[in-house]
Image (cartoon, rainbow, N blue to C red):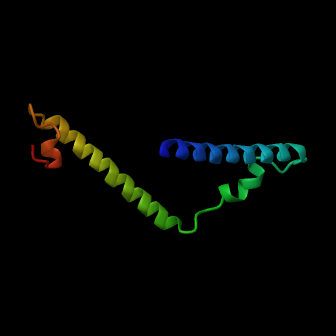
């Protein structure tokens, strides 16, 4: 019963959201946009530099380096330390 109740309300929410989207789409089609459409509305945000660009670049570079080194280390250990019943256990230090 709870599952049916939950599914009913999820359907209701989805249908109401789709209805709103359709109404907005129809209203947008009815009004004349002229040249103000597409990328011209967001070009100021697209080409705007980030507020803290140096911090963003440092965090992005460090995160990428840590992620790549973790993948390389796990991959190397999986390939070089394969034993009959211990493929990932030695790498992750999980007792069998």
Place of residue 68 in the rendered image (x, y in percent of width and height, measured from the top left): 33, 48
Q: Report the label total.
A: 0
Which residue extends farthest front? 1
Is 29 positioned to the left or the right of 67 in the image? Answer: right
At horizontal 64% and vertical 45% (from top left) the residue drawn is 12
Is 71 positioned to the left or the right of 8 in the image? Answer: left
At horizontal 20% and vertical 40% (from top left) the residue drawn is 76
Place of residue 42 in the rendered image (x, y in percent of width and height, measured from the top left): 72, 54
Q: Quadrant of residue 85?
A: top left
Place of residue 60 in the rendered image (x, y in percent of width and height, measured from the top left): 43, 57
Q: Nearer the viewer, residue 39 or 17?
A: 17
Q: Quadrant of residue 50?
A: bottom right
At horizontal 53% and vertical 68% (from top left) the residue drawn is 52
At horizontal 26% and vertical 44% (from top left) the residue drawn is 72
Report the quarter where the C terminus lies.
top left
Place of residue 21 in the rendered image (x, y in percent of width and height, measured from the top left): 73, 46
Q: Nearer the viewer, residue 38 or 11?
A: 11
Which residue extends farthest top? 84
């Amino acid at each position: 019963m709870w599952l049916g109740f939950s599914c009913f309300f999820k359907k209701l929410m989805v249908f109401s959201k789709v209805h709103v989207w359709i109404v907005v789409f129809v209203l947008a089609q009815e009004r004349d946009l002229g040249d103000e459409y597409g990328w011209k509305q967001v070009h100021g945000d697209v080409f705007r530099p980030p507020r803290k660009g140096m911090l963003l670049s440092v965090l992005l570079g460090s995160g990428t380096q840590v992620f790549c080194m973790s993948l390389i280390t796990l991959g190397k250990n999986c390939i070089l330390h394969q034993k009959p019943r211990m493929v990932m256990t030695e790498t992750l230090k999980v007792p069998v």
